[in-house]
Each structure stands twice: as C-alpha cells, then as structure tokens.
Amino acid sequence: MADENRGTYEGSCFCGAVRYEVKGPIGPMSNCFCTDCRRSHAAPFSTFIDALKANFRFVKGEDQLNTFLAESGAKRSFCRNCGSILICFNDANATTMEITAATLVTPTDLKPEFHIFVRSKVPWYDIRDGKPQHQTMP
C-alpha cells in the first residue's frame, strides 16, 4: 500500500554528501532477497520503497554518485564517498524506481508488505513475519 502522505520525502547517504527528495505518494515497501541485493548491501536482504521516477530528484551531490550495472539489468547508484546505495532502477522500467528504505530521513508509516526473490534467500535467515513470499517478482 502506498503512503498516503503526498508531501515530500527526503533522504541521504551515510556521510551526507548525496541528498535526494521524492514527492509522495510512495510505496509499497518490500524486502528483496535476490543475489544482487544481498551482495551489494552485504546483508541477507535489502528493503526498498517504490517511487515514481518523475517525482524523484537529487538535491545535493549527484556528482558524488557512481552507478553499477548488474548482469540482471538492475542499476544501483551509490555514494562514492561512503558507499551507501541510494536507489535501484532498471532502464526497461520508464516509470518506477526503488529507494533504499534505510536512506529515507523523512518518517513514514510504511512497512514491508511482501518479500521478493526468496528463491535466492540465504539458508541461515528465516522469514517469519507471515507476509507473502514470492520466488521472483510478484
């Protein structure tokens, strides 16, 4: 479910060199267990919030970004100073992108609604929240 707040959300990397804003609504929020996300975040999964590309913009430090293109076609833009991954997108999807949820500094009531790419989940992490689990994309 999208966040009903139609205001502006702000986010930044860990060091503050890169800042962004996105106009609401945003959502849904989901956890991704794909190999790309696990390795790029060095964690068992990553949590993303969907946003419209047209409503997103960098307000500071866009020149501090590097973008990595994975074999899957997904692109992740990260701060070259601190390494924080801020967004994930695919050129094949002209309208939607994902914001790394942990980089959002504006509070939101969103919570993960489902899990994707659980076929790639690490065996030592158990999903126990009862949310829908999809082997790939829903």
Image (cartoon, helix red, strand yellow):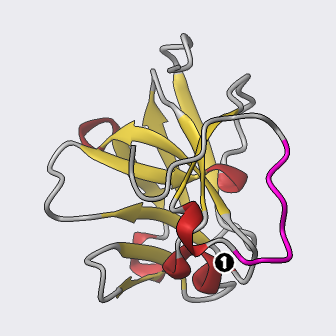
Give percent across and percent down for residue 87. Answer: 47, 62
Residue displayed at 13% across by 61% down? 92
Residue displayed at 52% across by 18% down? 7
Q: Is residue 50 above or below residue 84?
A: above
| Mark 1 lies on residue | 41
**Quadrant of the image containing the C terminus:** top left
- Please tell me how many numbered marks the rendered image carries: 1
| Residues in magenta, as a range | 122-128
Q: Residue furthest top?
A: 4
Q: Is residue 79 above or below residue 102?
A: below
Seen from the viewer's position, the closer of residues 11 and 43 is 43
Residue 47, magenta (yes or no): no
Residue displayed at 54% across by 81% down? 35
Residue 67 appears in which quarter of the rendering? bottom left
In the picture provided, is 19 more to the left or to the right than 109? left
In the picture provided, is 71 more to the left or to the right than 38? left
Residue displayed at 77% across by 34% down? 130
Seen from the viewer's position, the closer of residues 71 and 98 is 71
Q: Residues within 10 Å of mark 1 (few under 14, many from 20)?
A: some
Residue 127, magenta (yes or no): yes
* Residue 18 visible at all: no
| Main secondary-structure element of the magenta-colored stretch | loop
Q: Is residue 7 above or below residue 97?
A: above
Give percent across and percent down for residue 48. Answer: 57, 51
- The secondary structure type at the circle numbered 1 is helix
In the picture provided, is 107 more to the left or to the right than 126? left
Q: Amino acid at mark 1?
A: His
Give percent across and percent down for residue 21. Answer: 49, 42
In the picture provided, is 58 more to the left or to the right than 119? left
